[in-house]
Amino acid sequence: MTLLVFGQPDDGIIQIAYTVPDLDAAMQAFTTNLRAGPWFVFRRLAGRDPRYRGERSLAANDVALGFAGHMQIELIQPLDDQPSVYQETIAVRGHGFHHFGIAARDFDRECEAQRAKGYELAFTDAVEGVGRLAYFDTSGVLPGMLELIEATPELETLFNAMHEAAVDWDGSNPVREMVPEDKS
């Protein structure tokens, strides 16, 4: 498999994420001003066991993923006021930059490395058919949180398909709703 998105293992930042009050308006603004897109939208995205600061999380979010060149941009619109890593940041500084995303081939080892740096685990989840993720609170060191994204073959396939859609994109079909598979 060609690794367009991840490059070499643990290569650094693959994603920059922002919280937004209106996902549709944000996608339009990022497309118009930064030529980012097309956008792959996941409504009410949730994994198997979301945990915010150790407790089960009930927060609901809409998420859009798109590319500007080789950088993946994630836009996150919280849909409620439930406690979450997003609401926590919005309460402190409003909407805007939220986190850097780093792909980790050895997810457990990389999580331990972040803990060893003194970063507190703020959120974990596992997305069906994609992989695990963990947010670390890097307050005082970095301008936002750090998300570790498990670099599974399924995630690479998904992100590479999104990147391929962005290469030579002509601006048509800028928003692509991702409908979850029916598991019944």
Image: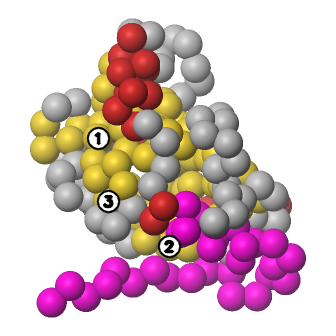
**Circle 2 crowding by C-alpha within 10 Å: few under 14, some 14–19, many from 20:** many
For disc 2, the marked residue is 41
**Circle 3 crowding by C-alpha within 10 Å: few under 14, some 14–19, many from 20:** some
- Which of discs 2 and 3 lies nearer the camera? The answer is 3
Tell me: residue 123, above or below residue 48.
above
Ranked by sequence position, the earlier of labels 2 and 3 is 2
Picture quadrant where residue 27 is located: bottom right
Q: What is the span of residues highlighted in magenta in the rendered image?
A: 156-184
Identify the disc placed on residue 127: 3
Q: Position of residue 132 (x, y in %)?
A: 34, 49
Tell me: residue 46, above or below residue 139.
below
Cα distance in 3D space between marks 1 and 3: 10 Å
Q: Residue at x 31, y 26 (%)?
A: 121
In terms of depth relative to the viewer, which is nearer, 34 or 116? 116
**Circle 1 crowding by C-alpha within 10 Å: few under 14, some 14–19, many from 20:** many
- Which of discs 1 and 2 lies nearer the camera? The answer is 1
Local secondary structure at mark 2: strand
Q: Amino acid at mark 3?
A: Val
